[in-house]
Image: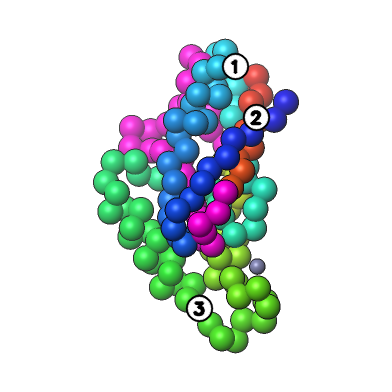
Amino acid sequence: MTHKFKVKTSGKCEMADITAAVAEIVRANDLESGVCHVFVPHTTCALAINENADPDVKTDILCKLDESVPEDPAYKHAEGNSPAHIKAVLVGSSLTVFIEDGALQLGTWQGLYLCEYDGPREREVWVKLIKA
Ligand code: ZN
């Protein structure tokens, strides 16, 4: 089965911490050892694993992505959100995390983030747990 939850983003671009929501799905399903796949069914947001301690890291990532993928009147996509589509392609729409002893195996400073690039919106996150 696929577990789903929603994330309401509040800014145009932000990194929303979804670590606790995914960890709760793992905990509630009593999976001792396996793999957790996380996926977003969207084309203008993404998923990333990165630092969960210093919030300035998120700011730096968002700023540098803005610099790297600026607005450009030459974009052909009529919806006007090509930078968001490009950032979503660069960052990626899925993650895989190992599960051991019933818990996500993350490094000390790692958290899971839904990366919004065309918010604010309500996003959906899909999680699939595989025993292994
Ligand atoms: Zn678009």
Instruction: Name the residue beneath numbered marker 2.
Output: 3
- Mark number for residue 71? 3
Query: How many angstroms separate mark 3 from mark 1 (CA)?
Result: 43 Å
Tag 3 and tag 1, C-beta contact below 8 Å: no
Rendered-image quadrant of the C terminus: top right
Q: Is residue 99 magenta?
A: yes
Residue at 45%, 34% (x, y): give it.
Answer: 19
Compare marks 3 and 1 and give the one earlier in the sequence. Answer: 1
- The percent coordinates of residue 9 (x first, y second) are 48, 50
* Beta carbon of the mark 2 residue lies under 8 A of ligand 1: no
- The percent coordinates of residue 130 (x first, y second) are 66, 24
Residue 37 in view in this figure = no
Q: Amino acid at mark 1?
A: Asn
Q: Amino acid at mark 2?
A: His
Q: Amino acid at mark 3?
A: Glu
Q: Which residues are magenta?
A: 96-122
Q: Is residue 81 magenta?
A: no
Above or below residue 95? Residue 21 is above
Instruction: Name the residue beneath numbered marker 1.
Output: 29
